[in-house]
Image (spheres, rainbow, N blue to C red):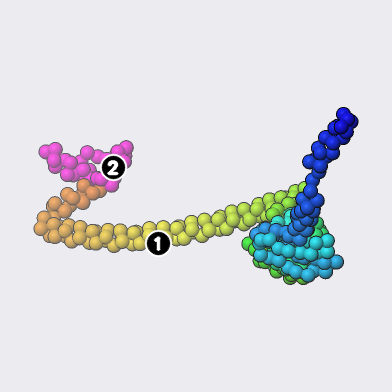
Amino acid sequence: MTTADKVTKKQGASGSKGKIPLFLLLLAGLLLLGMIAGFLTLFKVHQTTQVLIVRFGEVRREIFEPGLHVKVPLVDNIVIYDKRTLDLDPPPFEVLLTDKKRIAVDAFARYRITNPKLYYQRIGTEARLRDRFGKNINAALQRVIATVSLDAVLSRQRESIMNEIREEVRKSAESFGVKVIDVRIGRTDLPEDTSQAVFERMRTEREREARELRAQGNESARKIRAQADKEKELIIADAKKRSDILRGKGEASRNRILGRAFARDPSFFEFNKSLEVYRQSIKDGDTTLILSPDSEFFRYFNRSSR
């Protein structure tokens, strides 16, 4: 055997050893096809989502339970919607109130997709929902708020206004498979010119109320003073009446005592009366009397000097 024959024989032996068996290739192909089929057929539903099986644009199934599910590959499409409560914050807008005041209203809503099939048929995507639902919310706000005044929006009537808006939004949302959990007005801002006008009106109103309260206070004070003066006069008159009665009784008692004393000793009575005249005549301390020393007026002084 020549050298060339030996080299050819070695190459043939090594080539037969490196060749992969055909059944292994078929097995690998089947496994690959199975993986592709499983990937196209099986899908997982999360517990926070709900899924629609759509075939050629028609909803064939609704899946609400989490886990692995099966679909027809290359024919069925899956549409996933969230089960959880979602938020919607439409852009602010201005409303003209019944008192001709303009306010900028910024509202928000919380909702949940309860009928995914109807939602898919009427809305389709979340972007379309936000556009359409946001317009519905703003329209309801505008219809309701435009029928009230600024004072009503800023007062306790705000809750009843929000209930009316919430009911109107709920009715419109039910038509495309959405349940409205809540609708709230986040802020109600006044435009700058309106805010200044409202401030001036409020200041004028407060000043008017202050004037009314001061007037009422002055009137009450006048009535209280008049009543107090009346009561004072009554108290003084009653006290004077009692003092006159007591004084009369005292004078009567004094006269009775003096009468008994005069009956008992006339000279003492005359002496006491003279002392009373002296007291009345010179009570100021600066009275000047020009009398004769032996005047009858000073007879008791003359007697006492003897």
Q: Earlier in the sequence, mark 1 or mark 2?
A: 1
- Marks 1 & 2, CB-CB < 8 Å contact: no
Most foreground residue, 265 or 39: 39
- Classify residue 226 as left or right of residue 201: left
Q: For the residue labelled by badge 2, is the local secondary structure a helix, a strand or a loop?
A: loop
- On whether residue 45 falls in the magenta region, the answer is no
Dot 1 alpha-carbon crowd within 10 angstroms: few under 14, some 14 to 19, many 20 or more:
few
* Disc 1 residue type (three-letter): Leu
Rendered-image quadrant of the C terminus: top left
Residue 283 in picture, x, y percent from top left: 29, 43
What span is in magenta? 278-306
- Examine the rendering and report whether any part of residue 36 can be seen: no
Most foreground residue, 280 or 267: 280
Q: Which mark is residue 234?
A: 1
Q: Which mark is residue 282?
A: 2
Q: Which mark is nearer the camera, 1 or 2? A: 1
Q: For the residue labelled by badge 1, is the local secondary structure a helix, a strand or a loop?
A: helix
- On whether residue 279 falls in the magenta region, the answer is yes
Q: Which mark is residue 255?
A: none
